[in-house]
Amino acid sequence: MKKADVIIQARLGSTRLLGKVLLEVLGKPILEYIVQRIKNAKSVSDIAIATSMKGEDLRIVNLAESLGVKVFRGSEKDVLDRFYQAAKLYKMQHIIRICADCPLMDPGIINKTVSLYFESHADYCSNILDRTFPDGLDVEVFTFGALEHAWNNADLLSEREHVTPYIRKRGDIFKLVNLKNEINLSSKRWTLDKSEDFELIKSILESLYIKNPGFNMEDVLRFLGHNAHLEDLNRHIMQGEGYLKSLREDKQPI
């Protein structure tokens, strides 16, 4: 299987849930679960965590080093620049983008997305162009060339804060490919953005992780099928609030 390198973007200064990536479940921080699950993907070659230069994010640096993964510190707000500089430093040519709010990430979905990326010779391949997977299982794979083009040309705040919108909006420039699930599960919210999300994710991890640390999407679906009330915890939260906020406030960076 051809492989790609992962960059996880993570910082502690989230305004909606401060310090979320270091919140603990069963004695482990959320970020450790993400790294562990990514390491289980056969399509992953190397892993780097891209965080900010803020003093508080030194805790993320220390965790990354303890987990044996690379780390890069860059701009807090210009995440596209942080991402690009990390990929450039570590000479990554095929890049998997995963956010640190996805502790239920399924290694099998990473493998499928990477395989489709290489098979289709895409510039960008993901499972979010046409969402059919639960929010929180997002995987994006793209070439360094596409990332560099976006870094050179993106001039809106929403394109700098969220890394890939510039690429995703330009199908005339890039070959875009989407991985589709057989059943549309896009209404399910498994991402970590607010306290209600943490309560749901905590319940899932506490129930599944001890029995099977390598649990997958189907295991989560079965668990929630028997505990449907848990999905009411965060059902009211609008998906993509951060990106929608950026669009409302969109302007060219100063």
Image: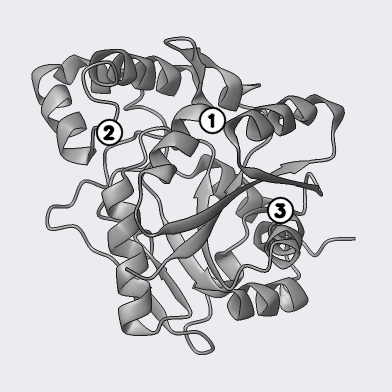
Which residue appears at 28% of the width and 15% of the height?
A: 210
Rendering coords of residue 37 (x, y %): 39, 38
Rendering coords of residue 45 (x, y %): 48, 58
Q: Quadrant of residue 187?
A: top left
Instruction: Please state if 57 lies on the left or on the right of 142 as rendered.
Output: right
Instruction: Please state if 232 lies on the left or on the right of 74 as rendered.
Output: left
Badge 1 marks a residue whose secondary structure is: helix
Label 3 and label 1: CA atoms lie apart by 18 Å
Label 2 and label 1: CA atoms lie apart by 16 Å
Q: Residues within 10 Å of mark 1 (few under 14, many from 20)?
A: many
Q: Relative to 32, say whether 86 is above or below.
A: below
Q: Relative to 236, say whether 41 is above or below.
A: below
* Foreground residue among 162 and 9: 9
Numbered label attached to residue 31: 1
Q: Is residue 193 visible?
A: no
Badge 2 marks a residue whose secondary structure is: loop
Which residue appears at 76% of the width and 70% of the height?
A: 155
The residue that label 3 is drawn on is 79
Label 3 and label 2: CA atoms lie apart by 30 Å
* Foreground residue among 62 and 143: 62
Q: Relative to 195, say whether 164 is above or below.
A: below
Instruction: Give the quarter of the figure containing the N terminus.
Output: bottom left
Q: Is residue 104 visible?
A: yes
Numbered label attached to residue 82: none
The residue that label 2 is drawn on is 214
* In contact (CB < 8 Å): disc 2 and disc 1: no
Mark found first going from the N terminus, 3 or 2:
3
Closer mark to the observer between disc 2 and disc 1: 2
Kindly identify the amino acid type of the residue bearing the numbered disc 1: Leu
Which residue appears at 63% of the width and 72% of the height?
A: 147
Closer mark to the observer between disc 3 and disc 2: 2
Q: Residues within 10 Å of mark 2 (few under 14, many from 20)?
A: some
